[in-house]
Amino acid sequence: MPGSDSAADITPWTVRDGLASFGEPATLLLHALDEVFTEWGTRAGAVRMTFPPLLAADDLRTLDYFRNFPHLGSTVSRIRTDRLDTHSRGTTGGPVPARDLADAGHLLPSAACYGCFVHFSGTTTDTPLRVSTVARCFRHEDHYDGLRRLWGFTMHETICIGSARQVGEHLEQHHERLAGFAADLGLSLSREPATDPFFEKEGSRTLMQLLAPVKDEYVHTDGTAVASMNNHRNFFGERRSLAYEGKAAFTGCVAFGLERWVHVLNERFEGDLRAATVAVRKAGEEA
Amino acid sequence: MPGSDSAADITPWTVRDGLASFGEPATLLLHALDEVFTEWGTRAGAVRMTFPPLLAADDLRTLDYFRNFPHLGSTVSRIRTDRLDTHSRGTTGGPVPARDLADAGHLLPSAACYGCFVHFSGTTTDTPLRVSTVARCFRHEDHYDGLRRLWGFTMHETICIGSARQVGEHLEQHHERLAGFAADLGLSLSREPATDPFFEKEGSRTLMQLLAPVKDEYVHTDGTAVASMNNHRNFFGERRSLAYEGKAAFTGCVAFGLERWVHVLNERFEGDLRAATVAVRKAGEEA
């Protein structure tokens, strides 16, 4: 393979400040994983879509984002016009000071599906809508840990918008595929109730607890959650006026954290990411 | 194709605040373009890599980023710890006010190659290094215009790190591929000196003007620049201690703005993005 013995190939990945650089084998493995999960979505009737790389603060507010996890958010702003000269003179160092920033109208997504629900706001459908999407997501955490816990990461999601039954079936269908895929790869994943921040907060503010148990994670033996099944019930349907057959739609998604898959597959294949990529393609076809 | 007549398919794309949502045909076209440009890179010996989705302000400062275009930068920050409660009570609206933001240690990339040069800082090579990468990039502009001028967009870059001659050959090789590809697609692209902000600023602060003419753009008949050839000479080599054969390396890159290609191909194929995707795959193989 051209360039396979170049400098770019020596380090499989590096992480600094919770942000990863991937060499070629890790890049190819991440792509292969994305293609497998995309193909599962296509077989389930999902359309592939791409949503905006930033979300408006006002839109996130309608989803209780700030109420539930304001601490995770990565706000996006710019240098105030009246402070540009200070910076262009090049006399400052370190971070851009808060006093030089403009208000932040947008945030980086913390999950791939928010953009989908915002996009389809105010629409009505009489057939279930399934969407496959991948997005760079960001969560500020107390600490970062290799590829297991990143500030910026890649999330593939396959979303269903429809009735409660259809959402349940969508999740169960993916559960079966995922179980077979993991088994083929020799990964031991256990299905566990989520420890996501969405669900950790105490009391009545946490909307999901009011409704039903709604999130399971797929956890590798080392504790890494590589995928989750999320049943939002009719929360997004209500908040974003998303109707199915005349009532607030139910929604759910299967989410895959691609860098975490690279982490667990690197363990499983003892650092041979090219072998992992071959195995992922093969297991994906069979799942 | 499953779901091809669903709601997700009706609108090819929507843009709000300079941020785009893509339906399936536009998503598939964007992927096809990325695959063609990746394949050209692979044939030229490039390794595929992925660089961090955010760049440290301190790293950008070493590249004269703030000196040249502080106004374009999208700073990334978070809500100050002592202001989280205000937001979680949900009583505010609109943007997150600047007074509630922490300092911004990072920015979103405005070009895909910065992450590459930061990544390879302090390294030495005796063989030219070619890297193919794709990144979500962001530039604050005075105004946005459909897919022609977005705040957030997708840039594919094929980068060469080596000698002046190797960089020149890398760019010329891509020039020939690009000319053939455009001709096959029936696109009329003219090669023009850049009007990029990197080059617009007057006077001695603009580093590139000190060195040589270095950037050409490929401009469609409607004025949309869909690709550029960038010869950075030894600027990044000097600034990031990137050595080739014992001296500051020369670098150059070919950059493709993928949403702009979707825009011009949508014009060319009169809104038939599926036909455009087929044509892109065919022309890519022949280029």
Image (cartoon, coloured by chain):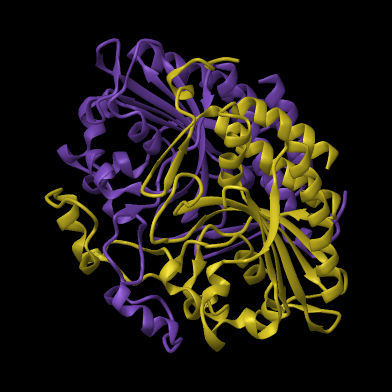
Chain colours: A purple, B yellow
Say left or right for B238 vs A17.
Answer: right
Q: Position of residue A173 (x, y in %)?
A: 52, 16
Q: Can residue A270 be seen from the camera position used here? A: no
Residue at image point 23% right, 44% down: A61
Residue at image point 35% right, 23% down: A251
Compared to A233, does A150 lie above or below?
A: below
Residue B126 appears in which quarter of the rendering? bottom right
Q: Which residue is outermost to the left?
A: B91
Compared to A57, does B70 lie above or below?
A: below
Compared to A204, does B70 lie above or below?
A: below
Viewer-proximal residue, B224 or B138? B224
Viewer-proximal residue, A136 or B197? B197
Residue at image point 22% right, 34% down: A207
Q: Where is residue A156 in the image (x, y as percent from the top left)?
A: 52, 36
Q: Where is residue B88 in the image (x, y as percent from the top left)?
A: 19, 51
Residue A208 appears in which quarter of the rendering? top left
